[in-house]
Each structure stands twice: as C-alpha cells, then as structure tokens.
Amino acid sequence: MRLKLPTVVLPSVLLLASACIVEAPGGASAEQRKAATVTQVPALSVRNGANLGGKVELVAATVQPGRLTPGERAQVTLYFKVLQAIDEDYLIFVHVEDAGGRMERMNLDHKPANGMLPTSQWKPGETVKDEFSIYLPADANPKALNIWLGLWDPRTDTRLTLTNPDAVRNDGKNRLLVAQVPVAR
C-alpha cells in the first residue's frame, strides 16, 4: 500500500518527494520485485561502473530533464547490478549540493526501490531500479547541482566502501558524483 506524502517547499533548498511503503513480513512479493528490477538499463543512461564493497555496481543513472529550471522537479533513476548477496539493509544516501557552494546541502536518504525491495533481499545478477526526485525552489539560483550518493547502513553509520575509486568520480569518502545538473537561467 503506497501512501503519498505531501511535498513541502522551503526556500532555497531541495526536497525529496517520497512515498511511504508498508512492507509485508517475509519480503517483497513477486509483483514488487518485478516493479523494482529491470532486465536492461536504458540506452540513454549515463554509465557509471562504481563498485560498492564488491557487492553492488552502480551501472548507470538518468536525470530527467537534463537541465533543471528553478521551480521545477527532476526525476533521478539509478540502476544497481547486484554482484553478491547483501546481509544488511542499506539506505541510499543522496547529497544534492550547489556546485558553487552557495546553497545548503540537502540529504535525500531513502530506502531503495521506494521501500519495495530492501538490499537484504537483492539477488545476485538482478539489476535494481531506484527512483527519486529533486525539487529546486523558484527562488534558488545555483549554476549547477552535484548529485552525490552511496549506500549507507544507518545502524552502524557506515558507508559501503567504493572499491574502484580511480575508475569513477568520487570525493574519497565513499561518495560517488553521479551527475552535475546545469540550472537554466
């Protein structure tokens, strides 16, 4: 059962539009797993290849639209290929920052696949799709937004380690720079 939460608009910040998912005991249903996984990553996705702990590869991401206008929302879609079974339930942490450093960072941490498929239920070989949106208030004026992310265990306050940091854009703290989105004037 999905419950839509209202999006609250605050000046000069980004917000996550999220839905609350009530999870049934015993894990994801076959329908939920089908909705949360894909057999192919869309061709127009930005390829990534970040390996997180040898367990997950961030294969690709899309940001639509590719240029954000103040007062509008962008949809971000991530594609995670599962390499090994994961025992923990990680959150996807997302930090959206003004590339120029003039806005406060927004934390858009969330459960993968809208809460339908926790990481402990991911199966090796499948590709899990995660979607979320960012909102840029009408009065915001950054030139570009950086979207950083990774997998985080809130119980231990640890991030899944980036095992190939020389191959992908990162900050040396297990945060991946997935995209820099220009802002229209």
Image (cartoon, rainbow, N blue to C red):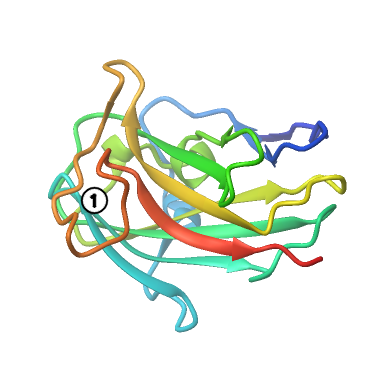
Q: Residue at x 31, y 20 (%)?
A: 157
In the rendered image, the quadrant that contains the C terminus is bottom right
Could you say where residue 38 lies in the image, as x and y percent from the top left? Answer: 41, 66
Nearest the viewer among 164 and 145 is: 145
In the rendered image, the quadrant that contains the N terminus is top right
Residue 73 visible in the picture: yes
Describe the element under mark 1 as helix, strand or loop: loop
Q: Residue at x 53, y 53 (%)?
A: 146
Q: Is residue 163 above or below residue 39?
A: above
**Few, some or many C-alpha atoms within 10 Å of disc 1 (few <14, some 14-19, many ≥20)?**
some
Quadrant in the picture for residue 63? bottom right
Q: Is residue 181 left or right of residue 74?
A: left
Instruction: Check the image and name the residue furthest to the top.
Output: 155
Could you say where residue 56 lies in the image, as x and y percent from the top left? Answer: 23, 52
Quadrant in the picture for residue 13? top right
Residue 1 visible in the picture: no
Residue at mark 1: 123
Q: Is residue 98 above or below residue 118?
A: below
Q: Is residue 100 above or below residue 152?
A: below
Q: Is residue 89 above or below residue 126?
A: above
Nearest the viewer among 159 and 69 is: 69
Q: Residue at x 20, y 47 (%)?
A: 162
